[in-house]
Image: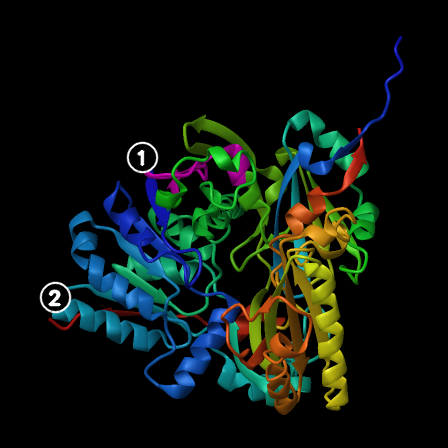
């Protein structure tokens, strides 16, 4: 049995969680998921300003902090912290190790970045058609910022078999971070579809960190103990493809069949065909059982052969947006907020500004649940203590969006009464980066695995 | 034999849920709190009813998948996020709260 822990569900997740995973109980592998699609474009912006940047700096700080623990406890780390500059991340990690006089074997998994090869692909008829719309990527070529392939677990497992103690990857499928140590330790083959699917499902279960151990859990949420010290998830994996999801003893949170089910259903499509680079996992074959306190056992997982394609995510610029908010208070807060919205829209129209979209939401009345929530009941509506007017605009034209941001603050003095700007200041104009999902034949790209022992 | 009356109940009494995004699509996993209530969910919470519930929010079709092993249904709401995560102007641009929005639905039990 091996223990694989997750210490980071997204970039911006708890800085402390990975440290607790290392220090509060036994684990063999620590996986850290830093890359959401949004993250890749943030990293791109950082690298435009600084060619040394483009990876998750948090990861380097973490490694510097825990390196002695990793060595003492023989814990190996797998992280997609490389972002769009895995070699920069490698250098920073090796430097941190050198400063502490600790020898460490770092591996990189790269080859996922196909940005510079797009022209060549288009010329050869590889169109990278949008999976939703069918349009070829060349239609927006001028707007494309990057394109990355999602690799699977095998190159990461290869890095582990070469003795890597820290594996830094660019884009790999999230679940592959968890599957890789199983492939390495148990010698699973590329055609072990059921076992690979079990590993993928284990990865899916823990890839969002505490969202499987009682965080964001709807069942009896008020009774879930000590969320302030919530334990992050650990997979205890067996060579036969069965596994348990649990957490360190003494930590907060709760691992139940209910908390696990919620996470299994998070961000999936057809549950019988969960497509990954390594296999097609079938979520309808999972059997769950509460095997003890904070311990859920998974058995019965089946899967099918992988497809001949990797998924590609291309990012492209798609205009500008800004969102502004002010808050109106009792009495008639909602009525005032609606009136202010009309005034704002009239002013924007008087200025001759056009937008691709204007959206108004009333936070405190029905912003998130919108139409399914309906309007506040007539007997309640006039008595709502406060309602936030939240207006967003989107346009290709930056100047129009910029001008919009100047029209929020004046509402406070020149509109309905009893209003505050929420202390937020002027809204910020944001360049929109959108995403283009596509497929590429596996034969067109090859993952590259390299080992970089520290110099000292 | 006493005639059994149908009563209206909110979905939140029978189920819990989690939602997330993929581009302009929202998925909502709906899970029976008790396994014996799963057939009620299958019968009452059809793709059509979910489409109706999110009318004006979900511009595209709604697909439904069954996971009897987990006592759960998975719904895919297409074109339901104002263009998707980074493009959307919504307070909830990733559809995280669509889960509880679905649980507002009233069904006959």
In the picture shown, does residue A320 fall above or below A213?
below
Q: Is residue A174 rendered to the left or right of residue A95?
A: right
User: In the rendered picture of this protein, how many numbered marks are placed on residues?
Assistant: 2
Element marked by disc 2: loop
In the picture shown, does residue A257 fall above or below A356?
above
Q: Is residue A247 magenta?
A: yes
For mark 2, what is the residue?
A100
Q: Is residue A200 rendered to the left or right of residue A337?
A: left
Residue situated in front as seen by the camera: A83 or A350: A350
- Which one is earlier in the sequence, the residue at label 2 or at label 1? 2
Question: Both on one chain, marks 2 and 1?
Answer: yes
Q: Is residue A30 magenta?
A: no
Residue A372: x, y in percent? 75, 51
How many residues crowd mark 1 within 10 Å: few (<14), some (14–19), many (20+)? few
Q: Chain of mark 1?
A: A
Residue A138: x, y in percent? 65, 85
Q: Is residue A114 rendered to the left or right of residue A93?
A: right
Q: Residue furthest top?
A: B1
Res A345 seen here = yes
- Judged by depth in the image, the label closer to the viewer, 2 or 1, is 1
For mark 1, what is the residue?
A249
Residue A322 location, quadrant: bottom right
Residue situated in front as seen by the camera: A292 or B84: B84
In the picture shown, does residue B26 fall above or below A430?
above
In the picture shown, does residue B75 fall above or below A320?
above
Res B14 seen here = no
Q: Specify start and end residues of the magenta stretch as a single range.
A: A234-260
Q: What is the C-alpha distance between the residues marked 2 and 1?
A: 31 Å
Residue A404 location, quadrant: bottom right
Element marked by disc 1: loop
Residue A90: x, y in percent? 28, 72
């Amino acid at each position: 049995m091996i223990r694989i822990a997750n210490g980071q569900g997204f970039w911006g997740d708890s800085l402390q969680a990975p440290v607790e995973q290392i220090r509060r109980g036994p684990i063999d592998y620590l996986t850290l998921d830093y890359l959401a699609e949004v993250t890749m474009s943030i990293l791109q912006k950082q690298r435009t300003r600084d060619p040394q940047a483009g990876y998750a700096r948090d990861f380097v700080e973490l490694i510097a902090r825990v390196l002695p623990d990793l060595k003492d406890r023989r814990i190996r780390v797998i992280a997609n912290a490389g972002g769009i500059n895995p070699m920069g991340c490698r250098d920073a990690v090796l430097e941190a190790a050198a400063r502490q006089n600790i020898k460490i074997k770092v591996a990189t998994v790269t080859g996922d970045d196909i940005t510079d090869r797009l022209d060549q692909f288009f010329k050869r008829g590889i169109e990278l058609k949008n999976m939703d719309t069918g349009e070829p990527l060349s239609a927006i070529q001028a707007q494309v910022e990057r394109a990355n392939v999602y690799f699977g677990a095998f190159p990461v497992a290869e890095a582990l078999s070469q003795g890597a103690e820290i594996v830094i990857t660019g884009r790999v499928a999230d679940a592959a971070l968890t599957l890789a140590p199983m492939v390495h330790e148990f010698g699973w083959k590329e055609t072990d579809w059921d076992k690979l699917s079990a590993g993928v499902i284990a990865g899916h279960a823990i890839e969002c960190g505490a969202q499987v151990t009682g965080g964001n859990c709807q069942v009896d949420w008020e009774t879930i103990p000590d969320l302030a010290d919530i334990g992050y998830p650990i997979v205890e994996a067996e060579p036969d493809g069965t596994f348990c999801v649990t957490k360190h003893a003494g930590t907060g949170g709760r691992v139940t069949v209910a908390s696990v089910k919620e996470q299994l259903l998070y961000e999936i499509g057809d549950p019988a065909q969960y497509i990954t680079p390594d296999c097609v996992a079938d979520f309808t074959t999972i059997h769950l059982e509460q095997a003890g306190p904070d311990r859920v056992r998974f058995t019965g997982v089946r899967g099918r052969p992988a497809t001949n394609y990797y998924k590609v995510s291309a990012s492209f610029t798609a205009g500008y947006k800004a969102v502004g908010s002010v808050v109106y208070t009792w009495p008639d807060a909602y009525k005032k907020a609606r009136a202010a919205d009309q005034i704002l829209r009239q002013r924007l129209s008087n200025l001759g500004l056009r937008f691709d979209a204007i959206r108004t939401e009333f936070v405190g009345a029905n912003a998130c649940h919108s139409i399914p929530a309906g309007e506040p009941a007539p007997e309640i509506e006039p008595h709502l203590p406060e309602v936030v007017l939240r207006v967003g605009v989107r346009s290709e034209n930056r100047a129009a969006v910029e001008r919009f941001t100047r029209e929020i603050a004046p509402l406070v003095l020149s509109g309905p009464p009893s209003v505050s700007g929420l202390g937020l200041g002027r809204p910020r104009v944001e360049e929109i980066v959108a995403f283009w999902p596509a497929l590429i034949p596996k034969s067109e790209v090859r993952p590259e695995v390299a080992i970089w022992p520290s110099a000292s | 034999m006493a005639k059994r009356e149908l009563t209206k109940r909110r979905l939140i009494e029978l189920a819990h849920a989690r939602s997330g995004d993929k581009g302009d699509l929202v998925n909502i996993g709906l899970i029976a709190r008790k396994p014996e209530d799963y057939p009620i969910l299958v019968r009452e919470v059809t793709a059509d009813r979910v489409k109706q519930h999110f009318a004006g929010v979900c511009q595209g079709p709604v697909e439904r998948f069954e996971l009897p092993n987990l006592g759960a249904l998975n719904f895919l709401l297409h074109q339901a996020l104002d263009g998707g995560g980074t493009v959307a102007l919504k307070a909830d641009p990733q559809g995280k709260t669509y889960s509880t929005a679905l649980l507002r639905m009233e069904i006959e039990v």
